[in-house]
Image (spheres, rainbow, N blue to C red):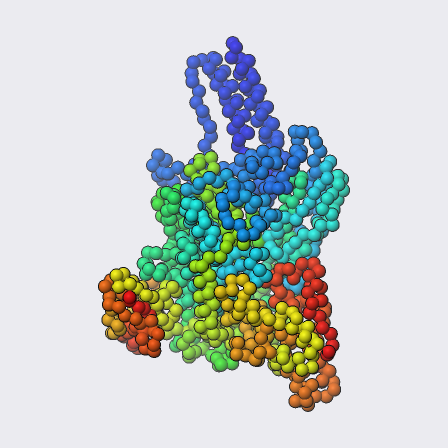
């Protein structure tokens, strides 16, 4: 247990002092002085060489004020509504979101902190935008709203825009950075997954469209990508100077095969070198974007206590309601969550009693879409289309067996009842939902391997590549369109050939080929979850959900 | 002397209020992060102290954290947390946020009478193997001291075999030089295994790839949590691959019964020693898109020519031809940006006052073009296609 609140102690101390003052006054004619303790000065900052009079006042971090008994108005994490357009109910299980930004007033500037997008340029999954969080669209809408409020948002991202490597992640990385520039991000860190991409494809994202080599979006103190990233940046917003630097954890980089042309040094040594330069800029606050584990970023926060805010790419799941306090409450340790689903907003105030405030904000459906990012998403899909599968480095791979896909229409010849049941399910028009999506319908996705893999026949759903004889394009056999029979039952070529007499098959072989095509109930759930995974189909994982879904698709026997 | 009663009253009042507030402070709950638990709509309307009325008191009898140690990636986990009401008023429980959609809480009873207990079952499903698993689920209560109880489950998700990394990126390779990479194959259930077969899935470029394996040293196996055995694979890519991207996969079959093959992706890009770049907003790898510019405006775009290989220090380039002539190209001084790479910046400008022209490529051959002449033996000429219009 900790004593977190100075107020009661201050009050009693004051009362005691008044009493002492009166005693002294009664005994002598000397006047007394208030010696209230100051909080959060330069104490703890390394290498403070400037005389106190000439250095800017350090920001003071204080504990949340004491709560009154059970009153939401007094709750420091329940905030005032600032007129954000709500298109859906806020997350009612998170009490801080019933009225975000309550008590904030007008910050001089705000830090708009994101990270770990991990490839989710759109909200995680495809089960309806209303139930999902994240994406560039909502980042843009939210930051625009803050800008219109006059809150001077400063966009900072800790890195890891993608999670895979290959041509599609490279395009996605480039589009993300185009998006970040349009959104107006001030500084973007690097993550191990970003650095895994081919250097020749990383560099175009590093280059500023203005051609101004001084205009560097990427920041990293211990990684050098052809001198095209800054080692630190000083950003001015709302009259505040914010010094920002970033690191990538060496332990994380060891696990990734990155190009030898990218120069990596120790994060500690790099920060030792960069910190004096940042400090010489005499900023009002200092931020470290640490793309490393939570433990390592805490270690760095303690080793370099001059940073008031340390943003970590570590941690699991949702970020906590409030940042963790380190260094005797002088440093805020901020988590960003996963899949870019959250923004951490830190308000900078001139209030010495509360110079910083924090609001965790989910990027949910309260933030409507905007044209700029819809255009960007559309452009991304057009790039995938122009590349085609071969341009994306995707070659159909041989199946582990010698069977091939034949298409669902062939199955209808003998299994018309099952085919009829299938026609009544959403599986039978799964590809149509990519060509004309029910939401964000202006952006077709039928050239996107990450979408195709679960909407057509013959693809590996988790590795985003087709098998030979599987769907390749709209020009493929119509029987390969949509989630067809063979998605569940496997390639049917041997079975069909044997039944049609196209190959010689004994009775035993005929029966064996039939049995190969059977998907039993006990094996089905695991099989279904290859597409209905947690990211894309969370409802499928609730208790009893599989049994309910099974009833809609079940069909037994030949006919 | 009348001051003294005032002094005494002040001292007593100050001391009492300080002690009282500090005493009350000890009943506040903080979570693992040292944060105050939020109040919100589940904030208590009855005080544990002060008004004398009884309050609910939430106690998790078997601890708030469960370590399942090791679990297979396909398994689902459950653990029962026993919640008891140690207070004098009914205890209400409700599900709060979880750290992921992979974990959720199930309640046998959501209202617990004084002295009674109930089970809260946490269920989870792991995604991704060979990694630490740590997730939380918040349980909301009407205990004034503990409005949020955070349950934590942790452990390690494993699977039978895993390649690390699962994909190798060779980055940019020169066409006349090969490359090598390695990966580790870990086994988590068996004490030993071996590779009995392997297959290259991209037959078109199979001839450029070779692989060999050897057992991992015990200390390398020890570095991988919960691994029992491992092999190290060495992949070699021979020179001669055509320019451009390549993608290959090696599919390894082991002697473990019923174990599916393990695949390792190999990707990279074969580049010549000379590469051209610009911002991804204007450059798609083949075409420089300057867009439509008004005749009263100027547009500048920076191109970078990066030179690697043995000729990088002596490399020179000059502008041989620019079409149409409205385009201006200026070569800036070269700069070594690492021991391996030299950059040659170029600035392409459409100056203010340029005559109207359309080079948007609406007809074949109607793009603009910049041709650079170099002294590189393999790249004596570099052509950059430019799309633009001046109106």
Q: Is residue A169 above or below residue A140?
A: below
- Count of number-bearing discs: 0
Does residue A340 appear in this view?
A: no
Q: Position of residue A241 (x, y in %)?
A: 38, 44
Q: Is residue A119 left or right of residue A485?
A: left
Q: Is residue B290 left or right of residue A252?
A: left
Q: Quadrant of the C terminus of chain B?
A: bottom left
Write down the quadrant of residue B91 in the picture.
top right
Residue shown at the point (70%, 52%) measured from the top left:
B106
Q: Closest to the observer: B44 or A317? A: B44
Residue shown at the point (59%, 67%) measured from the top left:
B162
Q: Is residue B156 left or right of residue A225?
A: right
Q: Position of residue A25 (x, y in %)?
A: 46, 15
Most extreme residue toward the top, as rendered?
A: B1
Does residue B350 appear in this view?
A: yes
Q: Position of residue A266 (x, y in %)?
A: 44, 55
Q: Is residue A28 above or below residue A408?
A: above
Write down the quadrant of residue A96 in the picture.
top right
Residue shown at the point (37%, 74%) measured from the top left:
B272
Residue shown at the point (47%, 53%) measured from the top left:
A141
Q: Position of residue B154 (x, y in %)?
A: 63, 54
């Amino acid at each position: 247990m900790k004593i977190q609140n100075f107020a009661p102690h201050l009050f009693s101390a004051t009362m005691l002092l008044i009493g002492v003052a009166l005693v002294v006054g009664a005994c002598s004619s000397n006047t007394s002085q208030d010696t209230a303790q100051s909080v959060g000065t330069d104490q703890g900052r390394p290498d403070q060489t400037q005389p106190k009079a000439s250095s800017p006042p350090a920001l003071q971090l204080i504990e949340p004020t004491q709560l009154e008994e059970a009153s939401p108005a007094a709750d420091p994490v329940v905030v005032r509504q600032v007129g954000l357009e709500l298109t859906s109910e806020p997350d009612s299980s998170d009490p801080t979101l019933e009225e975000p930004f309550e008590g904030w007033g007008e910050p001089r500037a705000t830090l708009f902190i994101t990270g770990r997008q991990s490839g989710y340029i759109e909200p995680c999954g495809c089960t309806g935008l209303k139930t999902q969080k994240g994406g560039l669209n909502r980042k843009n809408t939210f930051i625009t709203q803050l800008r219109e409020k006059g809150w001077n948002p400063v966009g900072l991202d800790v890195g890891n825009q993608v999670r895979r490597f290959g041509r599609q992640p490279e395009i996605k990385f480039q589009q993300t950075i185009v998006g970040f520039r349009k959104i107006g991000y001030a500084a973007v860190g690097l993550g191990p997954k970003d650095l895994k991409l081919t250097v020749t494809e990383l560099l175009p994202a590093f280059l500023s469209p203005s051609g101004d080599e001084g205009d560097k979006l990427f920041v990293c103190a211990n990684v050098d990508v052809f001198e095209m990233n800054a080692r630190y940046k000083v950003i001015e917003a709302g009259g505040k100077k914010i010094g920002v630097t970033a690191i990538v954890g060496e332990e994380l980089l060891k696990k990734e095969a990155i190009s030898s042309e990218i120069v990596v040094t120790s994060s500690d040594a790099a920060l030792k070198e960069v910190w004096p330069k940042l400090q010489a800029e005499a900023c009002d606050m200092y931020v470290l974007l640490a793309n490393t584990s939570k433990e390592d970023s805490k270690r760095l926060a303690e080793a370099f206590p001059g940073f008031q805010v340390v943003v970590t790419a570590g941690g699991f799941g949702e970020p906590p309601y409030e940042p963790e306090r380190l260094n005797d409450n002088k440093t805020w340790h901020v988590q960003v969550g996963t899949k870019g689903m959250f923004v951490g907003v830190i308000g900078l105030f001139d209030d010495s009693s509360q110079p910083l405030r924090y609001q965790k904000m989910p990027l949910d459906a309260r933030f409507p879409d905007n044209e700029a990012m819809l255009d960007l998403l559309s452009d991304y899909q057009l790039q995938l289309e122009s590349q085609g599968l071969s341009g994306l480095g995707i070659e159909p791979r041989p199946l582990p067996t010698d069977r091939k896909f034949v298409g669902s229409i062939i199955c209808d010849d003998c299994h018309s009842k099952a085919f009829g049941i299938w026609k009544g399910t959403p599986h039978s028009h799964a590809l149509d939902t990519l060509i004309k999506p029910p939401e964000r319908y202006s952006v077709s996705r039928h050239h996107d391997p990450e979408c195709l893999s679960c909407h057509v026949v013959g693809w590996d759903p988790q590795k985003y590549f087709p098998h030979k004889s599987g769907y390749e394009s709209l020009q493929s056999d119509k029987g390969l369109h949509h989630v067809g029979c063979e998605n569940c039952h496997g390639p049917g070529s041997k079975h069909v050939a044997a039944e049609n007499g196209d190959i010689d098959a004994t009775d035993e072989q005929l029966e064996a080929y039939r049995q190969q095509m059977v998907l039993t109930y006990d094996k089905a759930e695991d099989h279904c979850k290859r597409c209905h995974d947690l990211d894309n189909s969370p409802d499928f994982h609730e208790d009893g959900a599989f049994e309910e879904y099974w009833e809609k698709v079940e069909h037994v026997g030949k006919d | 002397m009348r001051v003294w009663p005032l002094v005494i009253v002040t001292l007593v009042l100050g001391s009492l209020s300080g002690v009282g507030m500090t005493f009350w402070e000890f009943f506040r709950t903080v979570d693992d992060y040292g944060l105050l638990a939020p109040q919100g709509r589940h904030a208590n309307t009855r005080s544990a102290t002060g008004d004398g009325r009884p309050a609910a008191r939430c106690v998790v009898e078997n601890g708030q954290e469960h370590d399942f140690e090791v679990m297979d990636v396909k398994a689902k986990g459950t653990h029962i947390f026993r919640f008891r009401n140690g207070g004098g008023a009914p205890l209400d429980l409700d599900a709060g946020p979880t750290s992921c959609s992979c974990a959720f809480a199930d309640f046998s009873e959501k209202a617990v009478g004084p002295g009674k207990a109930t089970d809260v079952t946490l269920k989870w499903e792991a995604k991704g193997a060979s990694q630490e698993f740590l997730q939380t689920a918040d349980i909301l209560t009407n205990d004034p001291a503990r409005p949020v109880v955070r349950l934590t489950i942790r452990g390690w998700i494993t699977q039978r075999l895993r390649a690390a990394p699962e994909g190798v990126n060779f980055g940019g390779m020169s066409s006349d030089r090969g490359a090598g990479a390695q990966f580790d194959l870990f086994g988590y259930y068996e004490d030993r295994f071996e590779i009995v077969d392997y297959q290259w899935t991209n037959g078109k470029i199979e001839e450029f790839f070779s692989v060999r394996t050897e057992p991992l040293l015990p200390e390398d196996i020890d570095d991988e949590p919960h691994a029992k055995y491992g092999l190290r694979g060495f992949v070699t890519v021979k020179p001669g691959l055509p320019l451009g991207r390549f993608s290959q996969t090696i599919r390894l079959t082991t002697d473990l019964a019923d174990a599916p093959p393990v695949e390792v992706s190999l990707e990279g890009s074969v580049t010549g020693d000379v590469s051209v770049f610009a911002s991804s907003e204007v450059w798609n790898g083949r075409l420089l898109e300057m867009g439509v510019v008004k005749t009263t405006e100027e547009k500048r775009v920076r191109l970078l020519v990066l030179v690697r290989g043995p000729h990088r220090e002596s490399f020179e380039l000059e502008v041989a031809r620019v079409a149409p002539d409205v385009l201006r190209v200026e070569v800036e001084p070269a700069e070594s940006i690492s021991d391996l790479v030299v950059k040659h910046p170029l600035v392409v400008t459409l100056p203010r006052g340029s005559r109207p022209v359309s080079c948007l490529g609406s007809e074949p051959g109607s793009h603009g073009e910049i041709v650079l002449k170099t002294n590189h033996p393999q790249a004596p000429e570099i052509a950059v296609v430019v799309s633009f219009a001046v109106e």
